[in-house]
Image (cartoon, helix red, strand yellow):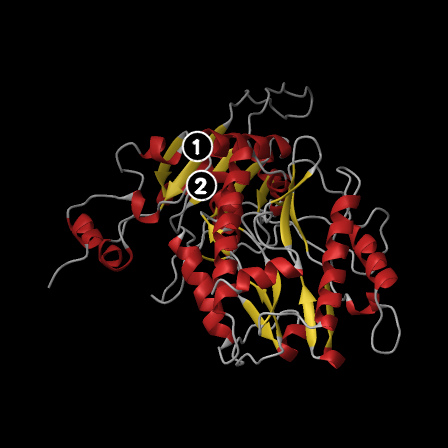
Amino acid sequence: MRLRWWIVAVLLGIPCDSLHALDSVPKPEYHQRRTALAEKLHGGIAVLFANNEPTMEYQDFRQDEDFYYLSGWNEPGAAMLLLPSVEATSATPGTGLGGRPARPYREILFLPSRNARMEKYTGPKMDAATPSVTMTTGFDEVLPMTELPAVLNKVAMEDRPRMRNVWTEASSVPATALLGFTAATLGGPEIEPAGDLSQPIMMLRAIKSPAEIELIRKASDASIEGQLAGMRAIKPGVLERAVSGAELAKMMELGCERASYPPIVGSGPNSTMLHYSENARTMKAGDLVVIDEAGEYSMYASDITRTMPVSGHFTARQREIYDLVLGAQRAAAAAFVAGQSTINDPEHKRLNSLDTVAFNYINEHGKDLHGQPLGQYMVHGIGHLVGIDVHDPWDYSKPLEKGMVFTIEPGIYLPDEGFGVRIEDVYYVDENGKLVDLMEKLPHEASEIEAAMKKR
């Protein structure tokens, strides 16, 4: 029986990070992110853990988003320790409190011990003894995971007050265990985290570098081709999930490693359900189908929604609603002002909310079957940030700034009429504060949708 080539690599003891290779931002950029985080901790200590490898072979491993953002490391079971530089302090006379020497910035990646038996199933990994491991990882120091408690204990022995300023991710089980063990070895009180690392990391992740924009662009370009493949697959008698599969196949062919979220292919009445995901209905002539599906390229997501007529042509009413939603999207994009505009405000309570712009446009330009304004049928926020997460974390009370990437996705859902329409594009804010539509090459107008569907 022929062995898979990666098993041969394991048996020969060849650690091969190309098995998990992704396109990446430059290694120095990860280092810059770590030092930027360290500066936000005011001398505190950061401890982060990677995700563990799934126990079942059908479960997909995906790295913890914050850990990946800071490291670019895509193997399971690792940890990192960031020790910001601190200035020297003098002893306080009459208190018995001694001073401390200055300490330089220090960053350490801890890698788990290799498991030769498991690697026969999951592929070879790297450890701290792998040649050129610091060059490969981009960390100043790489140590075995077994050294993590000892290193933290030594830090505590040298500067006990510093242990009152340890930052971890909220609800991190291994971080809680580590701090509990450290407290026990010191014979002191329980060590409580000083703060949740996800908050300062969120602020860093929100502003995308040019290298990140390029990865999101690649995810978006592959997703555009996926959506076009979906348009060509749509016709009466086809299962919703068959269209989803056609899109996913095209995106993976173009380099995506996975869908960036569970695909939504909702036809007819299912198009009125915002997050319908069963994708089990057979599409019928006269239906509209809402397809919310995009891919993830090298850990960076895209997010696209288009609405198509199953028969290839919109009815007059379907086109009216489609044009209304498209007009609302364009009105919101035109109203954007970097440093002022906000999104994800479905109750329209914030000044400068793009949600309100879209809501007002819909109310002013369309009526339901009862003659009432259609704004009541726009029932969700108009957008969200996009990055390593398809819904990148953000405080939506704050305005959108240069370098951010986000969606504009108005929708109208009309259960009484048996259809819904949503249009979603991903935009980024360039250095001049202008919006750039990463979906520019994908059909937007109803006539463009119909033309694309004719190419099947």
What percent of the width, then of the height, locates residue 37? 58, 35
Crowding at dot 1, Cα within 10 Å, few <14 / some 14-19 / many 20+, comes out as: some
Q: Residue at x 60, y 41 (%)?
A: 205
Q: Quick check: 12 above or below 316?
A: above
For the residue pair 335 and 398, the one nearer the viewer reads as: 335
Q: Residue at x 62, y 20 (%)?
A: 89
> Are discs 1 and 2 less than 8 Å apart at CB?
yes
What percent of the width, then of the height, locates residue 307? 62, 65
Q: Quick check: 367 above or below 165?
A: below
Q: Circle 1 is placed at which residue position?
A: 27
Tag 1 secondary structure = helix
Quadrant of the drawing holding the N terminus: bottom left
Q: Quadrant of residue 419?
A: bottom right
In-image side of 17 versus 201 (left or right): left
User: CA–CA distance between discs 1 and 2?
Assistant: 8 Å
Q: Quick check: 185 above or below 231?
A: above
Label annotation for residue 72: 2
What percent of the width, then of the height, locates residue 107? 46, 32
Ranked by sequence position, the earlier of labels 1 and 2 is 1
Q: Amino acid at mark 2?
A: Gly
Crowding at dot 2, Cα within 10 Å, few <14 / some 14-19 / many 20+, comes out as: many
